[in-house]
Image: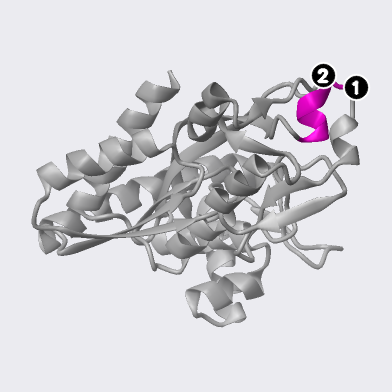
Amino acid sequence: MSEPGTPTFDQLKIFLTVVETGSFAAAGRRLNRATSVISYGIANLEAQLGIRLFEREGTRKPRLTAAGQAVLAEARSIGQGVDGLRAKVKGLLQGLEAKVDLAVDVMLPSKWFGEALRAFYVEFPTVALNVHVEALGAVTALVMEQKAVIGISGPLAADMPGIENVIIGSVPLIPVASPDHPLGRAGALEPGEGRNHVQLVLADRSRLTEGQDFAVVSPHTWRLGDLGAKRALLREGIGWGNMPLPMVEDDLAAGRLVKLAMPDETGVSYRMSGIYRRDAPPGPAAAWLLERFVAVGRRYAG
């Protein structure tokens, strides 16, 4: 049996792009190449390795073979290694950034946010910082559109193709309402009782996760684009909703809000991840800030 050849990085990049996009045509659009060039590149890679990577018979979209699945993990590892190398070299060539654009999820606890940025201010006093605060998929959308070089994202969109992410920690979400709300006055609730009342829900302003909901149980919803506005309406007794525990601890202690005793509420965790585009890695200051968020989040999240 002959030894397999050595594929080029360009061939592996074409292979990974076909897998991520789901078709040769879509891969061609992403890489700005003709579909025939993509097909030719895959054929050359298969010839080089001596195996068939995709099933093309009887299907409109290429489907990975068992051998293709095995090669995929190794190809991804190589791709990530090259991206890491490019990130280091880019930092060496460009030096310190003049400005860092950061996108953060509105659910990020203020203690995490403040501590990380205070450390960044001390470490990089000459670097300007632009902060975008968004909800749900809008954070990842800003990173993908290169309007932010790094993001602190929630769980709905952090695992998008082409996005590198590292887990920071989870923020507990708890169901709350005003003590004057019917659910707040009821004490112990029946299973499913929350479905009979208006639930205040954070709206997603991005198309990445449009139509997806997080911890929504009631068919009766009011949707808001601002978490502060949601908190204000909850305190006014308008509906009930899930809120990050760090944001409402003072309200709970002062009696402005109460935690709802929902028997079907098993505890919701909102996972936070640090993200960046794999093909546009952060420079030295942004990479340092991302590492600081990871350290702070993991410490607070335990």
* Farthest front residue in view: 180
Q: Is residue 182 left or right of residue 110?
A: right
**Residue at 17 percent of width and 55 percent of height:** 91
Residue 171 location (% of width, % of height): 52, 31
Q: Nearer the viewer, residue 62 or 88?
A: 88
Q: Is residue 171 above or below residue 274?
A: above
**Residue at 61 percent of width and 37 percent of height:** 243
For mark 1, does the 10 Å Cα neighbourhood hold few (<14), some (14 to 19), or many (20 or more) residues? few
**Residue at 82 percent of width and 40 percent of height:** 217
On-image quarter of the N terminus = top right
Q: Is residue 36 above or below residue 254?
A: below
**Residue at which label 2 appears:** 263
Q: Amino acid at mark 2?
A: Pro
- Picture disc at residue 147: none
Q: Which residues are magenta?
A: 181-190
Q: Nearer the viewer, residue 8 or 151?
A: 151
Residue 37 location (% of width, % of height): 54, 78
Residue 38 location (% of width, % of height): 56, 72
**Distance from label 1 to label 2 (Cα)?**
7 Å
Q: Amino acid at mark 1?
A: Glu
Q: Nearer the viewer, residue 3 or 221?
A: 221
Q: Is residue 119 left or right of residue 110?
A: left
**Residue at 57 percent of width and 64 percent of height:** 42
* Farthest bottom residue in view: 34
Frontmost of labels 1 and 2 is 1
Asked if one can make out residue 125 in the rendered structure from this viewpoint, the answer is yes
**Residue at which label 1 appears:** 190
Secondary structure beneath label 2: loop
User: Does 79 appear in magenta?
Assistant: no
Rendered image quadrant of residue 58: bottom right
Tally the numbered discs.
Answer: 2
On-image quarter of the C terminus = top left
